Image (cartoon, rainbow, N blue to C red):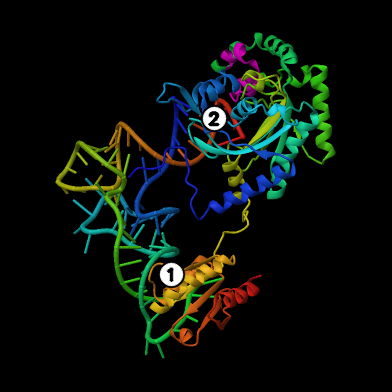
Amino acid sequence: MINIPKGTKDVLPFESYKWHYVENIVREVARLFGACEIRTPTFEHTELFLRGVGDTTDIVNKEMYTFEDKGGRSMTLKPEGTAGVARAFIENSLFNRPQPTKMYYITPVFRYERPQAGRLREHHQFGVEFFGADSWQADVEVISLAKTIFDKLGVKELQLNINSIGCPKCRKEYNAALKEYLASKIDGMCATCKDRLDKNPLRILDCKEEGCKEIIKDAPNTIDYLCDECKTHHDNVCKGLTSIGLDYTVNPRIVRGLDYYTRTVFEFISTSIGAQGTVCGGGRYNNLVEQVGGKPTSAVGFGMGLERLIIVLDKLGHTFGGEVVSDVYIAPMCDEARQLAMPLAKSLREKGLSCEYDLMDRSFKAQMKYADKLGCRAVVIIGEDEIKECRASVKFMYSGEQESVSLDGDTIYEYISSKLS
RNA sequence: GUGGGUAUAGCUCAGUUGGUUAGAGCGCAGGAUUGUGAUUCCUGAGGUCAAGGGUUCGACUCCCUUUAUCCACCCCA
């Protein structure tokens, strides 16, 4: 018995309709915002993530699925969606098309982590990336896109937290202020924080250690050290969100774990699905394109965890549009009828009715039970009596109503479809 | 990488201070006289009690190791 790799999940035939439902909504909302799908490879040159995501991040340091291919090249299964899109944007000169470039994707992503509730080694993200727009409106637009999805799905419990971590210019000043604040206190902090002080001081704000949290409480916030441009940008984003009726909390503790973020960062958080409550996280990343070898290009986007989203929807008792069932089951009762079932099924399918018939050589009674379990709405019964008169009995399972109709694809189709609509 | 919980049928779980042939509900398959499905009744299939070792006359039960899984930390979607 070989079982499924740790931290991965099968989506089984009786639950895939949930995924289809969510994927359809997500695609529909992307269309409403004018974003088109981009598909990039599942693996990329390792170098792309080292430069894009940042080599001080946990993702790159200890969580990547990296391997050498048979040509001796170092490859990595994508640990997030944005870097590959940035690479494709540059490589295909998408900046020469009308700007901005508004894209979305649905992709698996891979991180070697210890699985727990809402955290897997392979999970799936819906992501949105707007390249080429530096305006605050673009930030609002992207956040609004995510929010529209949650609205369409009827999810009200997600809390939007936003923050601004500034640009490299104000970050420099902020880091100096933070270091100054921490200088006298760093001895009381955890080992990782000591390490972060030089490499990436911003991440200290995110530490969950009790001792560190105590110290961080009074630490300076990025938002108080923004340069004029960043400050204006942030204020406008807030005003924009308010103008479309979007509730948010400015949370100075929101610091994203990927190095490429600048200015706006945000998260949509659920409190009901365990410790891993971030369903959607994103922000602006004006330096990414340049970091992976392109011309400086502003960009903003987010990633949305589809497994987590589906967990939230399950918790809410969402129906996902209902399980997909066949319209018609054909129940033949004798050998001659079995010969008739196939052409009848073919005819009904051509007209658009989904249709099944017995593949198990079951008795008539067992076929009726089976049709009921499947949830088929109509059963076409063909027995010796019917064949003699060239007719079929059509029974509607939800009402028990049954009638005899002419044994012919067009007639049966007309009769059933008129009753089902 | 660190900590804690759990492991018996496809699923959810019982199983007495260690005792003879390991059970239930659900699900699955078949049936309850001539051709009718959510109910009811009957029957059946399906288990190396996670794996390996130890204690014992005897282990699903006690001890050790391993593995898997879940939850939490870290981190993130």
x, y percentage for residue A102?
71, 35
Region of the chain picked out in magenta, as a range: A193-214
Q: Main secondary structure of the magenta part?
A: helix
Image disc number at residue A79: 2
On the picture, is A205 further left or further right than A227? left
The part of the image, by quadrant, that contains residue A214 is: top right
| Comes first in the chain, label 1 or label 2 | 2
Q: Is residue A288 above or below residue A99?
A: above
- Residue type at mark 1: give it: Asp
Closer to the eye: label 1 or 2? 1
Q: Are marks 1 and 2 on the same chain?
A: yes
Q: Is residue A400 above or below residue A248?
A: below
Q: Position of residue A175 (x, y in %)?
A: 69, 13
Q: Chain of mark 2?
A: A
At 40% across and 25% down in the image, what residue appears? A70
Q: Is residue A120 visible?
A: no
Residue under pointer 1: A358
